[in-house]
Amino acid sequence: MPDYNNKGGARILISLQEHADVRGWQPAGLWSSFTISLISAYCAFVICTQD
């Protein structure tokens, strides 16, 4: 299993998902799911490209 902790990308994504679960978010259809995925992917991209 790759070690993403040095970049923090996976940890951030997990934190976002856990936060969403704790807050009780239920994505209302495909648009919300797409938006959440897009934000998560953008955050991962920004974090992983900061060397």
Image (cartoon, rainbow, N blue to C red):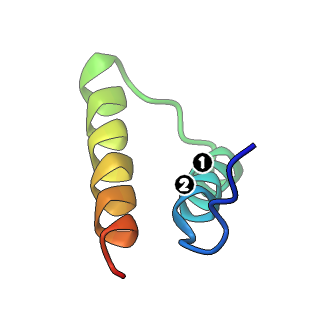
Q: Is residue 28 above or below residue 22?
A: above
Circle 2 — which element? helix
Q: Are marks 2 and 1 in contact (CB under 8 Å)?
A: yes
Q: Residue at x 66, y 44 (%)?
A: 21
Is 16 on the left-hand or right-hand side of 33?
A: right
- Of 11 and 32, the residue lying toward us: 11
Q: Where is residue 41? Give x, y as percent.
A: 33, 47
Q: Is residue 30 above or below residue 4?
A: above
| Separation of residues labelled 2 and 1 (CA atoms) | 6 Å
The amino acid at mark 2 is Leu
Image disc number at residue 13? 2
Q: Where is residue 20? Give x, y as percent.
A: 58, 49
Q: Quadrant of the N terminus?
A: top right
Q: Residue at x 64, y 53 (%)?
A: 14
Q: Farthest residue toward the top?
A: 29
Q: Residue at x 27, y 55 (%)?
A: 42
Is 6 on the left-hand or right-hand side of 46?
A: right
The amino acid at mark 1 is Gln
Image disc number at residue 17? 1
- Of 44 and 48, the residue lying toward us: 48
Quarter of the image for residue 38 reads top left
- Is disc 1 surrounded by few (<14), some (14 to 19) or many (20+) residues within 10 Å? some
Q: Where is residue 4? Give x, y as percent.
A: 62, 60
Q: Residue at x 36, y 28 (%)?
A: 33
